[in-house]
Image (tube, rainbow, N blue to C red):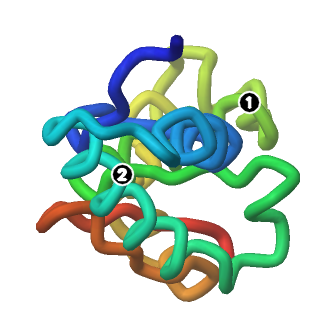
């Protein structure tokens, strides 16, 4: 049995939600039925994303700026001048909040029991 999936995680995988729904389907336990209802509502919203069945990342909205910062670090190396620590380069910073706000245009909102998660559209 997999662990309970709830809306406290910063990042979730749609395949885990799908698997948990399949696992809970048919359960008579009241707590599991409540979890199933919530997860089915998330899945209903998330299935609009093209990779839902193949593995879509759900990012908690409150974590989205940190997620984008990590994404930029992983995919877009900064020019070595910006990381040299030399003047004037050490005074130039990336506005990760602005980058995250702009990136939201490529994401859809999914409500997970009152908490907003973002999924690539």
The part of the image, by quadrant, that contains residue 80 is top right
Residue 101 image position (x, y, % from top left) = 39, 75
Look at the picture and state if 118 lies above or below 104.
above
Label 2: element kind: helix
The vertical placement of 72 against 2, above or below, is below
Q: Nearer the viewer, residue 15 or 61?
A: 15
Residue beneath disc 1:
74
The structure residue drawn at horizontal position 74% and vertical position 63%, both measured from the top left corner, is 52
Residue 72 appearing in the image: no
Q: Position of residue 55 (x, y in %)?
A: 78, 48
Residue at coordinates 61% horizontally, 32% vertically from top-left? 82
Question: Mark 2 or 1 closer to N-term?
Answer: 2
Please tell me the numbered disc located at residue 36. Answer: 2
Judge the density around disc 1: few (<14), some (14-19), many (≥20) Cα neighbours within 10 Å.
few
- The CA distance from mark 2 to mark 1 is 35 Å
* x 47%, y 27%: residue: 87
At 67% from the left edge and 85% from the top edge, which residue is drawn?
A: 48
Q: Is residue 114 left or right of residue 97?
A: left
Above or below residue 23? Residue 40 is below
């Amino acid at each position: 049995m997999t662990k309970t999936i709830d809306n406290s995680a910063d990042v979730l995988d749609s395949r885990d939600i799908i698997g948990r729904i399949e696992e809970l389907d048919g359960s008579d336990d009241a707590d599991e039925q409540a979890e199933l209802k919530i997860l089915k509502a998330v899945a209903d919203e998330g299935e609009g994303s093209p990779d839902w069945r193949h593995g879509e990342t759900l990012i908690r909205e409150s974590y989205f700026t940190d997620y984008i910062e990590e994404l930029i670090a992983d995919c877009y190396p900064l020019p070595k001048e910006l990381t040299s620590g030399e003047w004037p380069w050490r005074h130039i910073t990336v506005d990760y909040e602005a980058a995250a706000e702009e990136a939201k245009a490529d994401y859809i909102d999914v409500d997970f029991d009152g908490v907003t998660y973002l999924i690539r559209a």
